[in-house]
Amino acid sequence: MLVFDEAVQAGSGNINITNGANYQSISVTDNRVSFSTDKKTVTINPFDFAASVTVAVTIPEGTFTDLAGNKFTGTTGASGAAPWSFTTAAPADKQAPKVNLSRVMGLRM
């Protein structure tokens, strides 16, 4: 999710999302990119990535513009900013808890 300081709209280009082997390039006009009612929040819904991997998101200059047509400088704009990155959640714990009754009750088996 991206939160801008003013309303934005789709410009042109692709949002590039990768974790190395898994690469997704999503057009800013794709239905996986949506805008809030006030146009200040953009939500990107890529396909799922594996658990516990680092994901990098690169948004090129001009992918978004404000309503006056001024281009968003992107995450790799003139300032040389690094791509946005994060780590996906760890896998869900699907194992039921267990108890060792012999230890709890002081029994020797």
Image (cartoon, rainbow, N blue to C red):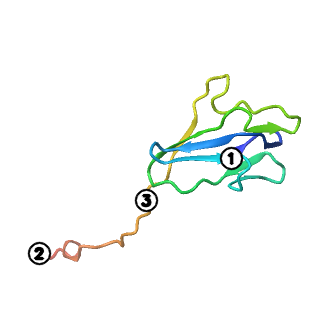
Q: Which residue is mark 3?
A: 91
**Which is in the foreground here, disc 1 or disc 3?**
1
User: In terms of depth relative to the viewer, which is nearer, 108 or 68?
Assistant: 68
Q: Give, as a three-letter code, the residue at label 2.
A: Arg
24 or 75: which is nearer to us? 24
Q: Residue at x 61, y 27 (%)?
A: 81
Residue 66, picture quadrant = top right
Q: Amino acid at mark 3?
A: Pro
- The disc placed on residue 27 is 1
C-alpha gap between disc 2 and disc 1:
64 Å
Residue 1 vs 98, above or below: the answer is: above
* Image quadrant where residue 16 sits: top right
In terms of secondary structure, where does tag 2 sit? loop
Q: Marks 2 and 3: which is nearer the front?
A: 3
Quarter of the image with the C terminus is bottom left
Residue 108's disc number: 2
- Say which element carries label 1: strand
The answer to whether the residue labelled 2 contacts the one labelled 1, judged by CB atoms less than 8 Å apart, is no
User: Mark 3 or mark 2, which is nearer the start of the sequence?
Assistant: 3
Q: CA distance from mark 2 to mark 3?
A: 36 Å
Q: Say above or below: 16 vs 89.
A: above
